Image (spheres, rainbow, N blue to C red):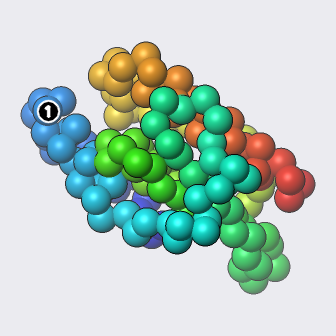
C-alpha cells in the first residue's frame, strides 16, 4: 500500500462523479491496506485526537545516501483506514525534512476532503498529519 502516490489518487478521485463513490473508494483503500499486527497496536503507536482508533508505525530506511521514512497504519474504521492510506501516499518514502515541509492540507484540498468529511473526521485527519510530522521531527 505504501507504493501509492498521491498524484495517482488525485487522478482516481477525479474519475468519480459524486461523493458517495469517492467514499466507497476511500473505504476500498482501507480494505486493501494490510492490518498492523496486534502487538503493534499499543499506546506508543496510537494517534491521539481521533474519534476512531488509529495506530501509526514509522520505519526509517536508508535509500542511497539519504534517510527516508515509511509509514504503516491501521484503524478500527475502514473509512479512516482509507484516509490513513491517503496520508501515507503523501508522506511515505520521503526524507524527514521533506515530510515536515509538505503542506498536506493543501494537497488534501485538491481531493475536496475537508468539504466532505465530518468535523470529527477532519479533526482526526489533522491529528494524523501532526503525528506524522512529529515522527519526522525525531529524525532531523
Residue 68 in sight from this viewpoint: yes
According to the picture, the residue beneath numbered tag 1 turns out to be: 20
- Secondary structure of the residue carrying numbered label 1: helix
Residue 16, image x, y percentages: 14, 40
Quadrant containing the N terminus in the rendered view: bottom left
Which quadrant of the view contains residue 102? top right
Residue 89 in sight from this viewpoint: no
Q: Which of 32 and 51 is in front in this view?
A: 51
Q: How crowded is mark 1: few (under 14 residues within 10 Å), some or many (20 or more)?
A: few
Q: Which of 59 and 52 is in front in this view?
A: 52
For image coordinates 48% across by 30% down, the residue present is 51
For image coordinates 77% across by 43% down, the residue present is 134
The answer to whether residue 87 is above or below residue 64 is: above
Residue 116, image x, y percentages: 30, 22
Residue 80, image x, y percentages: 40, 42
In-image side of 50 versus 130 (left or right): left
Amino acid at each position: 500500500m505504501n507504493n501509492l502516490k498521491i498524484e495517482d489518487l488525485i487522478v482516481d478521485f477525479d474519475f468519480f462523479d459524486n461523493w458517495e463513490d469517492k467514499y466507497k473508494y476511500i473505504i476500498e483503500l482501507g480494505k486493501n491496506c494490510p492490518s498492523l499486527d496486534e502487538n503493534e497496536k499499543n499506546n506508543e503507536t496510537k494517534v491521539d485526537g481521533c474519534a476512531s482508533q488509529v495506530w501509526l508505525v514509522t520505519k526509517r530506511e536508508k535509500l542511497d545516501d539519504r534517510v527516508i521514512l515509511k509509514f504503516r497504519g491501521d484503524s478500527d474504521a475502514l473509512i479512516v483506514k482509507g484516509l490513513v492510506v491517503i496520508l501515507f501516499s503523501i508522506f511515505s518514502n520521503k526524507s524527514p525534512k521533506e515530510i515536515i515541509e509538505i503542506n498536506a492540507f493543501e494537497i488534501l484540498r485538491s481531493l475536496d476532503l475537508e468539504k466532505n468529511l465530518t468535523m470529527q473526521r477532519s479533526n482526526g485527519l489533522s491529528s494524523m498529519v501532526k503525528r506524522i510530522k512529529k515522527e519526522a521531527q525525531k529524525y532531523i
